[in-house]
Image (cartoon, rainbow, N blue to C red):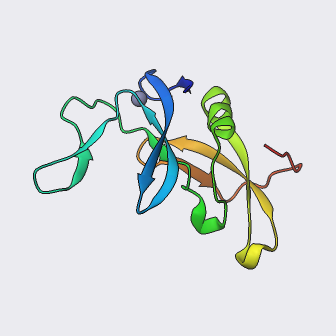
Amino acid sequence: MILGNCPYCDGIVTSKKITAQGKTVKLYSCQNAKKEYDESEQYVFTADSTCRFRVYSNAFLRWNKRSFSEYEMKNLLKDGQATIRLHGRKGTGEYFKYVITDEEYGVSVLWDEEVEKEETA
Ligand SMILES: [Zn+2]
């Protein structure tokens, strides 16, 4: 599924399902950011990769957001920013934050900015 264009190289960003550590997650990646296992079983960018833009749908798991959806990723690519809902521990205290693309890490949360209105994705 095509989600949009890469903010860094204008390549096509697609979504695909992968299995990581026994769990199915979605990987959103730029067509120019490919990874493979090298001879020492390290998961590395391929020699022909010119971009590093890759985001896993569980990127915000540590803030108790189970899945960053295709819809949210589309918005992020379109607007350069998306609003996500995060949760405190034990599922209490949900809050909203802006997320932006990050060339090195794929996505990053703007922790210092308050989201004015609660916008649901
Ligand atoms: Zn790219």
Q: Nearer the viewer, residue 19 or 75?
A: 19
Q: Residue furthest right?
A: 117
Horizontal arrangement in the rendering, residue 75 relative to residue 118 (left or right): left
x and y percent of residue 52 in the render? Answer: 36, 39
Q: Which residue is rendered at x = 59% and y = 63% of the image?
A: 61
Q: Nearer the viewer, residue 47 or 27?
A: 27
108 shown above or below 78: below
Q: Which residue is rendered at x = 70% and y = 41% of the image?
A: 82
x and y percent of residue 120 in the render? Answer: 83, 46
User: For residue 114, which quarter of the picture?
Assistant: bottom right
Q: Quadrant of the C terminus?
A: top right
Q: Residue furthest front?
A: 22
Horizontal arrangement in the rendering, residue 47 relative to residue 18 (left or right): left
Number of marks in picture: 0
Q: Quadrant of the N terminus?
A: top right
Q: Nearer the viewer, residue 45 or 27?
A: 27
Q: Residue furthest bottom?
A: 90
User: For residue 41, which quarter of the picture?
Assistant: bottom left
User: For residue 21, which quarter of the picture?
Assistant: bottom left
97 shown above or below 13: below
Ligand 1's quadrant is top left
x and y percent of residue 67 in the render? Answer: 63, 53
x and y percent of residue 60 in the render? Answer: 59, 58
